């Protein structure tokens, strides 16, 4: 059964219609990238990643595919239904000097040769755009080999990040389905996957919030932009404390992302 993307293809095409080609994720760069790198290093511990196959679903303009090649030696593939986003992704791979295949197709109706092919399937900010999360996760799982690993990362719209997004730009909030760790874990279990762990990651990353689609010349929008700049500075202060003094508690209210790691049985 197919389910509908609440954002829609035209929204994504607009998002990816930019000229700047991005650099790969730097695992030693900013706090957010360091935290994700630590998470992936932990997830892949004990796994032979060199030459293993990894598919990123929703790969348009992703900075992550080159990272997975450079840091772990994966053979990478990307899947997205935005032709513009796929072209951008191919350019990112070329700029990084790494090989990778980008397939432009809908994840619900992919080329049959892709099914059951991958050791790792990963997504960043895809599953939360579908009303029926379990159906979306089940579609992800079809790409896995037996025993393969599924990593699903979404923004946490059930806590402070979601509250601020609703406050400053309700239409963007409305294209998300708010999901807690319990919700995301349950969706993976409903898709017949064995959950290894499901947790919140990174305290209050207000840089996730955005004003996409608003008139940036409007006075109210400029006030909202000022608020987001202030909150972004607050995030950086919290991260400094978290990294160098006292660990900041991660929970449904404070977590910026929800990440679930599960395996095909």
Image (cartoon, rainbow, N blue to C red):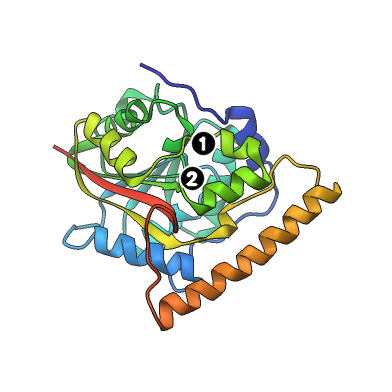
Q: Are marks 2 and 1 in contact (CB under 8 Å)?
A: yes
Crowding near pointer 2: few (<14 within 10 Å), some, many (20+)?
A: many
User: For residue 176, which numbered disc appears in the image?
Assistant: 1
**Rendering quarter of residue 78:** top left
Residue 35 position (above or below residue 187): below
Question: In the image shown, does 87 or 6 lie closer to the viewer?
Answer: 6
Upstream in the sequence, badge 2 or badge 1?
Answer: 2
Residue 19 position (above or below residue 184): below
Q: List the residue tagged with mark 2.
A: 157
Which residue of the protein is positioned furthest toward the top in this rendering? 1
Q: Quadrant of the C terminus?
A: top left
Residue occupying image coordinates x 55% and y 72%: 236
Question: In the image shown, does 141 or 248 lie closer to the viewer?
Answer: 248
The image position of residue 142, as x and y in percent, is 27, 30
Question: In the image shown, does 91 or 247 lie closer to the viewer?
Answer: 247
Crowding near pointer 1: few (<14 within 10 Å), some, many (20+)?
A: many
**Rendering quarter of residue 113:** top left
The image position of residue 247, as x and y in percent, is 37, 74
Which residue of the protein is positioned furthest toward the bottom in this rendering? 245
- Residue 240 visible in the displayed image: yes
């Amino acid at each position: 059964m197919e389910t509908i993307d609440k954002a829609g293809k035209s929204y994504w095409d607009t998002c990816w219609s930019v000229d700047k080609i991005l650099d790969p994720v730097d695992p030693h760069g900013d706090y957010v990238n360091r935290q994700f790198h630590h998470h992936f290093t932990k997830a892949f511990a004990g796994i032979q990643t060199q030459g293993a196959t990894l598919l990123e679903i929703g790969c348009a303009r992703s900075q992550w595919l080159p990272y997975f090649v450079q840091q772990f030696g994966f053979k990478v593939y990307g899947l997205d239904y935005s032709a513009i986003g796929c072209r951008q992704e191919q350019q990112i791979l070329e700029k990084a000097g790494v090989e990778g295949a980008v397939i432009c197709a809908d994840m619900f109706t992919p080329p049959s040769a892709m099914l059951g092919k991958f050791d790792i399937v990963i997504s960043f900010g895809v599953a939360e755009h579908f009303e029926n999360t379990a159906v979306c996760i089940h579609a992800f799982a079809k790409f896995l080999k037996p025993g393969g690993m599924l990593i699903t990362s979404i923004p946490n719209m059930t806590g402070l990040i979601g509250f601020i997004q609703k406050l400053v730009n309700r239409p963007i909030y409305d294209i998300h389905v708010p999901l807690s760790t319990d919700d995301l874990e349950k969706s993976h279990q409903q898709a017949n996957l064995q959950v290894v762990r499901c947790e919140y990651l990174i305290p209050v990353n207000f840089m996730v919030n955005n004003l996409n689609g608003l008139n940036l010349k409007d006075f109210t929008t400029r006030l909202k932009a000022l608020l987001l700049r202030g909150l972004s500075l607050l995030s950086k202060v919290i991260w400094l404390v978290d990294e160098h003094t006292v660990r900041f508690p991660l929970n449904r209210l404070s977590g910026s992302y929800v990440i679930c790691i599960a395996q095909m049985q």
